[in-house]
């Protein structure tokens, strides 16, 4: 009888161990699926929602309203802004795992492609990695919100700018939409892509909200330079923009 009991206990132990291993594999698989790099297109709508105290801008809350598309894969992001009423299209391409910044402008005044040198990326603070503030601290807070079918979590960044302006920015990000190494300004090492977020451009806060999300495989060739347009460095690009009476684009992502 004891022998039978021992055999049954051994069987239960093996079964339990097998189920535990199966459960671990299942959890690991879920984690792997969660961390799969997103590839696709997200469309955002943005508008000015706040003007910080002591900001020197003359903008009013209704002065800015725009839509842009963000193309993403594991290596690059490309933001496309079309201002059809102005005959203007602006494209900003950034590297995710390496320092890279390219901006193109197609307009009635001419077509320009700027590839920033590594030093220009630092000097002009062109990417989130080099964006400077006197103080920057990101903290997670409680709460969940469903946005476009994705469960999003909330984070807050408390900032003191180089002009000593205090500001608080908020992002609702989807952990399911993830790209390793992807960053946006003022939200360091965010573990997911924000579907609603505030960004500060040095003068006022613009709030962007995702209006459409499409998962799609995008190969690296899509993020290359446009053909038939000569590229210049970013400093020369700014000089050319000044020559035709335009300002440097101020709504950086």
Image: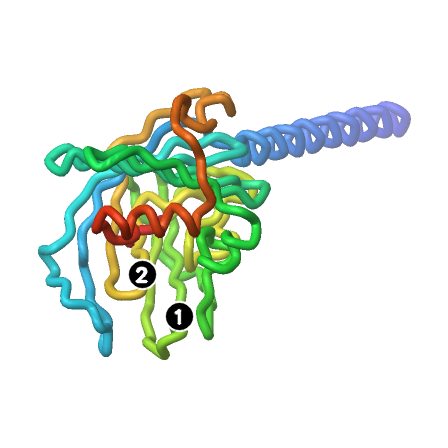
Outermost front residue: 243
Quarter residue 108 falls in: top left
Residue depicted at x 30% and y 52%: 248
Residue pointed to by mark 2: 200
Residue depicted at x 15% and y 47%: 65
> Does label 2 or label 1 sit earlier along the sequence?
1
Position of residue 197 in the picture relative to residue 138 (left or right)? left
Q: Give the camera-side residue of 131 and 248.
A: 248
Q: Of circles 2 and 1, which is in front?
A: 2
Position of residue 76 in the picture relative to residue 98 (left or right)? left
- Image location (x, y in percent) of residue 222: 44, 23
Q: Quadrant of the N terminus?
A: top right
Residue 69 shows in the view? no
Outermost right residue: 3
Q: Give the camera-side residue of 127 and 214.
A: 127
**Is 75 above or below relative to 55?**
above
């Amino acid at each position: 009888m004891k022998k039978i009991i021992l055999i049954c206990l051994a069987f239960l132990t093996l079964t339990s161990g097998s189920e535990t291993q199966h459960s671990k594999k299942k959890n690991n698989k879920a984690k792997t699926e969660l961390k799969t790099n997103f590839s696709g297109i997200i469309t955002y709508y943005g508008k000015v929602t706040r003007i910080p105290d002591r900001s020197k801008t003359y903008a009013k809350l209704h002065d800015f309203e725009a839509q842009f598309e963000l193309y993403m894969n594991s290596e690059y992001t490309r933001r496309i802004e079309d201002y059809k009423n102005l005959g203007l299209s602006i494209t900003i391409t950034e590297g995710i795992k390496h320092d890279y910044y390219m901006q193109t402008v197609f307009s009635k005044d001419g077509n320009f492609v700027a590839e920033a040198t590594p030093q220009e990326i630092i000097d002009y603070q062109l990417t989130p990695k080099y964006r400077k503030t006197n103080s920057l601290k990101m903290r997670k807070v409680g709460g969940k919100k469903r946005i476009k079918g994705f469960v999003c979590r909330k984070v807050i960044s408390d900032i003191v700018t180089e002009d000593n302006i205090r500001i608080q920015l908020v992002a609702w990000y989807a952990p399911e939409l993830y790209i390793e190494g992807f960053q946006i300004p003022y939200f360091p090492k965010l573990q997911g892509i924000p579907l609603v977020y505030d960004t500060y451009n040095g003068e006022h806060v613009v709030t962007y909200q995702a209006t459409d999300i499409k998962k799609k495989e995008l190969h690296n060739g899509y993020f290359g330079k446009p053909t038939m347009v000569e590229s210049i460095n970013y400093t020369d690009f700014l000089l050319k923009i000044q020559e035709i009476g335009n300002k440097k684009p101020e709504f950086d992502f």
